Amino acid sequence: MPFIDLSSPAQTSDPSVAQQPVTAQPAVDQQQTQSAPAQQAPEPISDPLAMGATDEQQPPQQMQQPANAPEPVTDMPQPELAQQSQQPEPAAQPVVPQMPEAALVPDDGMQIATQQTPAESVMTVDNTAQASAPAAPLQAPAAAVNEAAPADVTTPAAAMVPEPELQPQPSAQSASTSLPPLPDNGTQSQKVELSGSAQGKEDQVAQILQKADQLTETKQKQKSVQQSDTVGLKPKDASEDYYAQRASMDDFLALAEERGASDLHMSTGYPPMLRVDGKLMPIGSQILQFERVQTLLYSIISDEQKKSLETDLDIDFSHSIQSGTRFRVNMFHKKGQLAGAFRLIPSRIRTIAELGLPEVMYEFAKLPHGLVLVTGPTGHGKSTTLASIIQEINVTEAQHIITIEDPIEYVFPRAKSLVDQREVGTDVTSFTRALRAALREDPDVVLVGEMRDFETIASAITVAETGHLVFSTLHTNSAAQSIDRMIDVFPEQQQAQIRAQLANVIAAVVAQRLVPIQGGGRKAVLEIMIANAAIKNAIREGKTYQIDNMIQTSAELGMIPLEKSLIKLVRSGDLTIEEAQTYTTKPDELLQLMKSNTA
């Protein structure tokens, strides 16, 4: 009579071992069950759900309980039992847990028998009466099978049947996981062995368990993606359309850093845009709706900033992401809807040499006083160039440097100099007020982030006149144009006075722009004017139109015309001659310099 022998120690002093339920395994042949002496027939199980039967089909099942058997575990979670039956189960009756789908065996009216040593009792369950009304298969959680397993389990080859393929279930609770290792309670080593020809089935069992592990892992990944969609954290394999639909504001900024973008634009009615190498490119194809833009932009500003945005209709500030990278942010309204522009500020200040700037830039860092302007279009590296000069002073000189910015962009590390950085709107109300206060703060060097109006220009000239070194920026394309811009913002009756003041303090003007080069990336082309006596006289007399020619003929003083910078890139193969001509207002002079040997 073939059967499954589930042998275990007769007694143990460890309560954790004694209270583990015994799980029966099906036999192949329908034969009589051997019983051990000194058995006492228990009451039949009154709850058909405990044996897997339905309410309509309740096969007669009996279970013999050993006289000295431990109390059954009744605190095992049984969600299905709680849903199908409202009647409480008698505490004395054992609970038969559910088996995982991978371990199910078709019910053909087989007998389930448990044979123990003569000193132990026998548990017998007869299912022969289920032929006319098949019951639901017995099931138990996978973890319970191992915990209830006796010391040695021997399964004959005939008892092994092909396991069904695991199918994904709609609920995560139904996904089977790999069986945990059997507990070692110090009484006896527990293991499960397959005997006879059943040993060849181990690979199939391992494959089924592996599939169960893969199914569980897949469900966990799906759950992780769903959670990340909720909180705005991007998964590693996020598509570009994911950003437009679910990503957080910091996700967009991290993507801008990852792609090497200089700017990020968020505007209602358009997909998110990155500026890479001077060109705009969309992130995916999803159009941003007003609610989405508002949610993203509002997520990184305070309530006070929201009020300021609603009152003034635009705000400027800086924002840092988890990597430490900072962004200069401008939020504004357009057609009654929100939009935002983000400028990436590199976390490390690059040196003059790393930027490929000419040697004369080091001389600007050594000036004792005067006004140095760095000019150019928006997004063409003015702040980066200024930061490299200020950092050169910071690491080589012991001076007091005051920066006035809106907002603060580069953060200067502690070095030889004392650097106090003030942000307009946070530390001071305006550029003009900060410049006036700087005269009482014992500065050596003052950096003005941008000269936007004649009050700021007049204050900067005054600070330079009092013997300080002042750096600032303008949105102009050439040295001569920069001088004219500073003078023209003043009323006509004041312009003569401003010319005289400016001629006295101007030290240099660096007009730069970044041009895309072959193979990707951008490089700076510069026009450098150094204010010698001739240039100072031209400014004082209102003859700024002569400045371009003076720059062309003063290369020995370190002056560099824009055309010479362009030719240098053409000869290095970074630009074509046709591309270079688009960046100058003097294309004919560019061709002449290209043909000469002096360029």
Image (cartoon, rainbow, N blue to C red):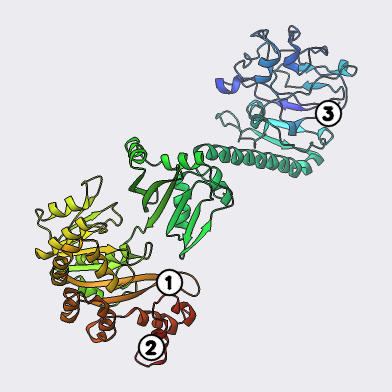
First-in-chain label (3 vs 1): 3
First-in-chain label (2 vs 3): 3
Q: Nearer the viewer, residue 132 or 293?
A: 293
Q: Nearer the viewer, residue 359 or 36?
A: 359
Residue 515 - label = 1
Image position of 270 (left or right of 456): right
Tag 2 secondary structure? helix
Tag 1 secondary structure? strand
Tag 3 secondary structure? loop
Residue matched to label 2:
593
Q: Position of residue 117 (x, y in %)?
A: 72, 21
Q: Badge 2, how many Cα within 10 Å: few under 14, some, many 20+?
A: some
Say which amino acid is labelled 3.
Pro
Measured in 3D between alpha carbons, the distance from the residue under mark 2 to the one under mark 3, in whole angstroms, is 92 Å
In which quadrant of the rendered view does residue 535 lie?
A: bottom left
Q: Badge 3, how many Cα within 10 Å: few under 14, some, many 20+?
A: few
Q: Position of residue 364 (x, y in %)?
A: 21, 72
Residue matched to label 3:
106
Measured in 3D between alpha carbons, the distance from the residue under mark 2 to the one under mark 1, in whole angstroms, is 19 Å
Quadrant where the image shows the N terminus: top right
